[in-house]
Image (cartoon, helix red, strand yellow):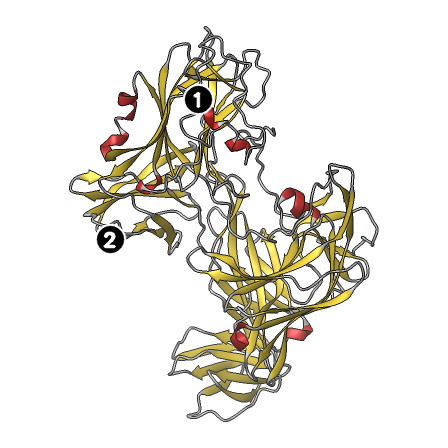
Amino acid sequence: MNKIFLSTVLAVLALPTFGQEVKSRTAVAPQSSGTLSPVSVARKAAGPKLVSARKAVSAETSAAWILEYGERVDVFSEDFSKMTTGSIGKPDLDTDILIANPESPWTNVNPAYTDQPGWGAWAAYPAGGAVAVFDEEGLEDYAHINTPRLDLSANDGVAVLEFRARTNKKNNSTLIVEAAETYNMSPTWKIMEEAYMDFDVTPEWQTYQFVFRGCESSTIFNIVPQSSPSIYFDDLKVFQVKPYIGMPKTLPHSDYKGDSFTANWKPVEGADYYLLSVKEYNAELEQWDEFIDEAKVEGTSFVVSETKSGVNYSYTVYAVKDGHTSLPGDEVFVVDLAAPVMGGTTLTGTGYHAEWTEVPSAEVYNYWALNERVAKEDGKFYVTKCDFDNVLLADGSEPTMNLGDEPLAYDDTYVFGVDQAGWHATNYMPFVGGFVAMDAYFYIYQGSQSGIISPAMDLSKNGGNIDLSMKLMGERVAWWDNEGKKHENIVQCAVALFNYDEKSGDFLQAELIYPGDIQEEWGTYTAHLTKGAKQSKIGIFAVTMPGYLYVDDLFITQEYKAGESLVEPFHFERYYEDTAIDVTVPERVKYQHLYHEVSAIKTDVQINFGDIVESRFSDRQVVQAMEAGISTPSMENAAVVLRGNALTVANPAGESVEVFAADGRRVAADHSAAASVNLNLSVPGTYIVRVGGKSIKIAF
């Protein structure tokens, strides 16, 4: 039997670095192949959570506090009365209570030894009406016993695990208690994030009680002794509490502004009102301090004010009915940053200089510069046209990898040297010759997606229909099974569409297709997507086998009507350390409308150690609106007066005022909506003054 822990009790955690890491494959022999889903967008869901752990002289005193919230509902019990052989101090080590070919290691106990089927165990033995776990010599490295799958989805998913335990010698022992939602032993479980391992187990019988929340329809509890001598268990019970008033379902916060945010929750049937408690993290003392203590709220949201940008907060909500208070809803953590505010831009000889406000607690920033391409006629429009001919390494140098070289890959980076900036790449490497590759080795063996994902763009045109064409080639991978038989197969490709979801605040997978049978030679493959939205991303992933998927000549097209446009990034700076930047504007976008936006970044070290937190974007701001061949119709009611180099514009409608040089460069602008705008022209020449949609030519 494989000795597998439900969860990793101890883990080494490290802050991420703001950069790219190049890594090589490790020597791991493949065991099998199969198609796996290419990407997990959302953070892994946490499993059941431990609310309380107590021990008491009797079960009645131990359970008293939880029964204040409702009526006890018994779900499951086991007294181990069928484990008749052996005794306390001398368990029957000769009796094997396990079955030979179980459905799972977690359901391997012979049902003849328990009142209820479905138990799992290792190094467990009968002990005279109790069960002994962990042999006397301490030789077993994963002795444990776990309950059958239990439906605990009712009563707000709150459940109580209770049992008696003791050792048989003078020495104390310790144990771990953990829980998981197994989804009927599916491949993906929701496992509790932290296992409880504090209590000493003594030579006297004592009652232990563990209260969990977040239990679902097939939850198991696992008990793991951590030291010799043996621990004996008896009278295990699981019960729930039918609440007098239901527990509120807390929702993510909204409207974060740095100095305030809105706490949200769903209504509870019959609730008279709610109590909201908010905590603030004190980084200096490394503790959570009370910020709001049980504020009475009639509705299902509350604006928490006087907060500080970058400081972490959390909130819980209780429902109250007829004097009864519910258990608190799940704690919601607020780890946001305020969005930066864009300042003005100043034109330079090669582009422009931009600035934005510093955000408290921000460590770095993500800066995007975007251009707007307009379709000149009806028909095919290239959303992405990338031949990778000029692709670069993350440091801006030329690629050095060739086919057949020892495999290397960037852990997490962006695709550099292409016109459309902002393609996010994981387990990726550019190659000599102008193509790129993603290494599925890290996807198969580390669960880390291997692919390139586009920047967010409006892909809703033509009803969301999107066409992809690309050249692909897969690496052939060989492996040997447990019987020594050799197998071979080729790395395959998956294409996924992700659309932004307002509720989750994330991009969720909307479509997944496989563009065909990838071969060892270059071939052209196509894919058709149908669910493009106003904010969409497209991902191309290496899957099925632990090797390279090579990509070249990537074209993404949609049917556009004349006048429709696409806003796309032409410049991206990731983890930028300053609040000002000089951007070079490429010739290809010089006469297009340009925009920019920025977000703030910090590392969350209190809640999810090492996670990157990104603020919402600043309001997207116009950089310049240059067009070739600006028309010069006369303005109504002479609105422009030039005296020397002083330009005065009468602007009763409060429209934007922009001044362009003859070569199309914008040299001045005013978006204040003032009724009278005064600007100075520094260099003699011919200029175009635009007020709203009207323009006029002047000479200085």
Judge by depth and name the residue closer to the eye, 12 or 224: 224
Q: Secondary structure at mark 2?
A: loop
Q: Which residue is mark 1?
A: 198
Quarter where residue 556 is shown? bottom right
In which quadrant of the rendered image does the N terminus lie?
A: top right
Kindly identify the residue that appears in the image at 54 percent across and 36 percent down: 103
Kindly identify the residue that appears in the image at 55 percent across and 35 percent down: 104
Give the crowd class for mark 1: few <14, some 14-19, many >=20 residues within 10 Å: few
Kindly identify the residue that appears in the image at 51 percent across and 79 percent down: 658
**Residue 276, percent from left and from top:** 28, 44
**Residue 365, percent from left and from top:** 55, 53
The three-letter code of the residue at mark 1 reads Asp
Judge by depth and name the residue closer to the eye, 301 or 258: 301
Extreme residue toward the top, this view: 170
In which quadrant of the rendered image does the C terminus lie?
A: bottom right
Q: Is residue 287 visible?
A: yes
The three-letter code of the residue at mark 2 reads Gly
Q: Secondary structure at mark 1?
A: loop
**Residue 114, percent from left and from top:** 43, 25
Extreme residue toward the front, this view: 112
Compute the Cα span from label 2 to label 1: 40 Å
- Number of numbered discs visible in the structure rendering: 2
In the drawing, what numbered circle is on residue 314?
A: none
Q: Which residue is mark 2?
A: 299
Judge by depth and name the residue closer to the eye, 317 or 444: 444
